[in-house]
Amino acid sequence: MRLRVLTWNIFHGRDFPPNPALFTSRSKLWRVTERDDSHAQVNRDLFASFAGVIAAADWDVALLQECPPRWSRWLARACAANGHQALTSRNWALPFTSAFAEFNPDLIGSEEGGSNTTLVRSSAIAERRRLVICPYRRPERRVMAFTRLASGVCVANLHASTTPDLAVGELRHAASTALEWTAGAPLIVGGDFNVRPQRTPGIFDELRERGFSGPTAPDSIDHVLAHRLQVASPPRARPPEERELSYDGLRLRLSDHAPVETTFTTTE
């Protein structure tokens, strides 16, 4: 069995042009579209744009972080997928923040609230669990979404803290708990780890010793690791142009992260 996996931090459904000068106060406050010679920065709800890119990608399992809670069900429908949503932080004012974010996503930013959302095309979902890997409001509540597919493969989707020391502990906790919950089944652990192997190699060495595959790249923070699965194609971050769309003669770049794709096969 081949299992194609995509992970993507979708930046609360916002765009992220390469030119920081396009992030202006008038755009943030008054929703004015800013432009340079190549890109536009828009302060608009971009569900249709993100849904189009995600639905068109070639995957069996998609792991999304910083996914607006209001989007999870819609994305599952747009992708003809089964979904598992685990709410993360700043969700105490839903649905009011969702309504505001739909009107002005840049002004509210991450204060809309977020989720880790797992989408599954290749199989039904047999079990859904969640694990709080950082329970504190400061720096931020962090959660792992654990999904068992009807095929038997288990998937853990997480977004770790931005402080590397905290992120390492959260990743270790998430991986250990996910391994325990699998009861020996194949496991995929992916998401935004906020840990770069070139700066913090020890945790990836530790996970390799426990049977996990390797990270995406030395400078990457977005990874997909597998346990009891073979790597058929190593994790690859898409180049920026592959998450860009045409907009009024310019380019619209989605998210501040690149999607990462990989393929695994069963070892049996």
Image (cartoon, grey):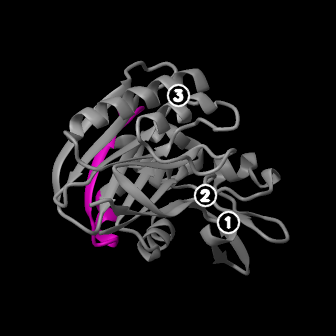
In space, the residues marked 2 and 3 are separated at their CA atoms by 20 Å
Would you name the residue on which mark 3 appears? Answer: 167
First in sequence: mark 1 vs mark 3: 3
Would you name the residue on which mark 1 appears? Answer: 239
**What percent of the width, then of the height, locates residue 26?**
73, 50
CA neighbours of label 1 inside 10 A, class few (<14), some (14 to 19), many (20+) = few
Q: Identify the image quadrant of the N terminus.
A: bottom left
Q: Identify the image quadrant of the C terminus.
A: bottom left
Would you name the residue on which mark 2 appears? Answer: 258
CA neighbours of label 3 inside 10 A, class few (<14), some (14 to 19), many (20+) = many
Marks 1,2: beta carbons within 8 A: yes
Question: Looking at numbered disc 2 in the image, what kind of residue is underneath it?
Answer: Ala
Identity of the residue furthest to the right in this view: 37
Instruction: From the viewer's side, name the closer residue of 53 and 262.
Output: 262
Q: Is residue 144 above or below residue 132?
A: below
Tell me: 37 left or right of 163.
right
Marks 2,3: beta carbons within 8 A: no
Res 92 visible: no
**What percent of the width, then of the height, locates residue 62?**
39, 60
Stretch in magenta:
73-92
Residue positioned 69% across, 45% down in the render:
219
In space, the residues marked 1 and 3 are separated at their CA atoms by 25 Å
Q: Is residue 60 magenta?
A: no
Residue positioned 58% across, 51% down in the render:
216
Q: Secondary structure at mark 2?
A: loop
